[in-house]
Image (tube, rainbow, N blue to C red):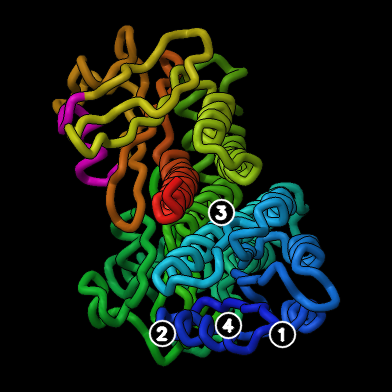
């Protein structure tokens, strides 16, 4: 798959500057389009998507400020860098008030130009990713509600073909995958068979039995773990197991469909637009959908076994709770991801972003304290970046490097969901507790570009059962939020460095 180059619109009425900027940015890997006037810029922006615009303030006819305001109104996620002369400080301030993300002074320095555009593109990419995620969360919410409320088709059994088709269609819509399929266990044959598919006409081979451990679907079923595979043909875990002749892409996302005692099948997705791979967020969304599917597809005989066990061990009125719990957990996970996403997009300043996402987690899980710890580059220790204590108790301000369950999460990038963390041999009371006794712990890694930057810890009420599925959703959402924090800080620091350099150059 060929990566698409970031698209930048350069607006300047002077041909020399337009072409000079184009040449520099083209050499830095950007795809550049130019416009010589405000009208030309607005027409080109309407016809094609641009993440960044480099806009001269002084334009003939329509002023640069007018163009800036219209661009921001019509393309709210576009980042606009303004070009100005040193004598235009008041205009620059007005441009920043109107939404410009940065300014560069003429004459331009090549390196400063490239750095500024790269910062702006990173900011646009994050905003665009969040907007897309919010849309997908809305789609997930709508599809889950539809699945949970839709009556069976006439003559359809609980796990009949109509329901299976709706589940496959929901996966296609939520993940933006052209081809999805749902495979369910055939108890008599001892394997998986296709129950529904979207995006292709299944041939006879599609209905062949898939044995546990064979193919990607069989391997995921046997392991009971969801996977996102960027290139199944080159992934050693699935060597020789992919079927490239059936699909346009070698990127897959597959999640087991959980049942009361064992998986009921697998939910698969592939062939996204332009062969795009599936990321951890995609996998978290697919797992939520698979959990809902498991609740709806659970065989009646399995439900009876669970009910009989519960009747023997609990009060009668508690028998119905587990079924409702599966529904509420999936809905809670979707709502949790939505709230974290909204917290990040609603705030800009890092401290407010952190505070908003911690409140969202605390409210969704009924947890306190909930704290974000990030690695201190100097010491390697985990330092508390912010916390929501709910008036209950506080988390520790500093955690020693590499100790306890928390240290294991940071080192391995694997979450911990433990109702009784003290029973785990890795438990360290000086690290894995808040300022008080041990409590149920959900600790997830915060990752950026494949590297663990810290952890988020949520301490739940005594007796609560932390959910690993919720942890996966939380890890993806919080990692995305922290990326925004780091990008904002980087932008502020870069702007301050440029300002200092300009003051030094002018002798002030």
**Quick one: quadrant of the N terminus?**
bottom left
Disc 4 to disc 1: CB gap under 8 Å:
no
**Which residue matches tag 1?**
36
**Which residue matches tag 3?**
289
Depth check, mark 2 against mark 4: the one in front is 4
Count residues near mark 3 (Cα–Cα under 10 Å), then give few for <14, some for 14-19, many for 20+.
many
- In magenta, the rendered stretch is 400-414
Give the mark nearest the N terminus, 4 or 1: 4
Question: In this picture, is 383 found above or below 139?
Answer: above
Considering the whole magenta stretch, tell me its main secondary structure: helix
Q: Nearer the viewer, residue 412 or 106?
A: 106
Question: Considering the numbered disc 4 on the image, is that residue within a helix, a strand or a loop?
Answer: helix
Give the mark nearest the N terminus, 2 or 1: 2
Image mark for residue 17: 4
Q: Residue at x 36, y 43 (%)?
A: 446
Depth check, mark 2 against mark 3: the one in front is 2
Q: Residue at x 41, y 75 (%)?
A: 251
Residue 267 is a magenta residue: no
Gap between marks 4 and 3, in whole Å?
Answer: 51 Å
Residue 16, how many percent across, how many down? 58, 88
Q: Nearer the viewer, residue 417 or 451?
A: 451
């Amino acid at each position: 798959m060929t990566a698409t180059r970031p698209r930048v619109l350069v607006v300047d009425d002077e041909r020399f500057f337009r072409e000079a900027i184009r040449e520099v940015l083209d050499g830095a890997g950007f795809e550049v389009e130019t416009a010589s006037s405000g009208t030309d810029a607005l027409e080109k922006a309407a016809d094609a998507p641009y993440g960044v615009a480099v806009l001269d303030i002084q334009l003939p006819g329509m002023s640069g400020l007018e163009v800036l305001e219209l661009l921001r109104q019509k393309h709210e996620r576009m980042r606009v860098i303004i070009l100005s002369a040193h004598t235009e400080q008041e205009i620059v301030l007005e441009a920043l008030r109107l939404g410009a993300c940065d300014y560069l002074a003429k004459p331009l320095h090549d390196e400063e130009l490239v750095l500024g555009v790269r910062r702006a593109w990173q900011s646009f990419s994050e905003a665009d990713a969040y907007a897309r995620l919010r849309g997908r969360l809305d789609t997930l919410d709508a599809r889950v509600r539809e699945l949970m409320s839709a009556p069976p088709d006439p003559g359809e059994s609980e796990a009949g073909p109509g329901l299976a088709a709706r589940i496959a269609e929901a996966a296609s819509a939520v993940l933006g995958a052209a081809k999805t399929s749902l495979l369910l266990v055939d108890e008599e044959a001892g394997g998986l068979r296709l129950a529904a598919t979207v995006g292709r006409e299944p041939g006879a081979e599609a209905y062949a039995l898939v044995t546990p451990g064979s193919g990607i679907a069989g391997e995921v079923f046997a392991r009971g773990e969801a996977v996102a595979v960027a290139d199944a043909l080159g992934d050693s875990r699935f060597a020789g197991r992919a079927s490239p002749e059936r699909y346009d892409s070698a990127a897959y996302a597959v999640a087991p469909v959980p049942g009361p005692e064992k998986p009921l099948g697998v939910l698969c997705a592939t062939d996204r637009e332009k062969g795009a791979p599936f990321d951890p967020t995609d996998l978290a969304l697919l797992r939520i959908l698979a959990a809902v599917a498991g609740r709806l597809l659970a065989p009646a005989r399995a439900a009876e076994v669970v009910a009989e066990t519960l009747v023997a061990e609990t009060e009668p009125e508690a028998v119905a709770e587990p079924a409702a719990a599966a529904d509420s957990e999936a809905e809670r996970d979707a709502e949790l991801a939505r709230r974290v996403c909204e917290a990040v997009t609603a705030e800009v300043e890092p401290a407010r972003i952190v505070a908003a996402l911690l409140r969202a987690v605390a409210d969704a899980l009924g947890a306190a304290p909930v704290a974000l710890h990030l690695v201190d580059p100097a010491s390697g220790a985990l330092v508390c970046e912010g916390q929501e204590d709910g008036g209950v108790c506080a988390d520790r301000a500093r955690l020693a490097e590499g100790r306890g369950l928390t240290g294991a999460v940071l080192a391995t990038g694997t979450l911990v969901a433990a109702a009784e963390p003290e029973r785990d041999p890795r438990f360290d009371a000086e690290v894995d507790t808040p300022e008080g006794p041990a409590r149920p712990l959900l600790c997830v890694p915060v990752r950026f570009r494949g590297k663990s930057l810290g952890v988020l810890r949520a301490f739940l009420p005594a007796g609560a059962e932390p959910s690993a599925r919720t942890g996966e959703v939380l890890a993806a959402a919080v990692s995305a939020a922290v990326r925004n924090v780091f990008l904002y800080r980087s932008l502020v620091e870069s702007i301050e460095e440029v300002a200092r350099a300009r003051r030094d150059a002018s002798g002030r």
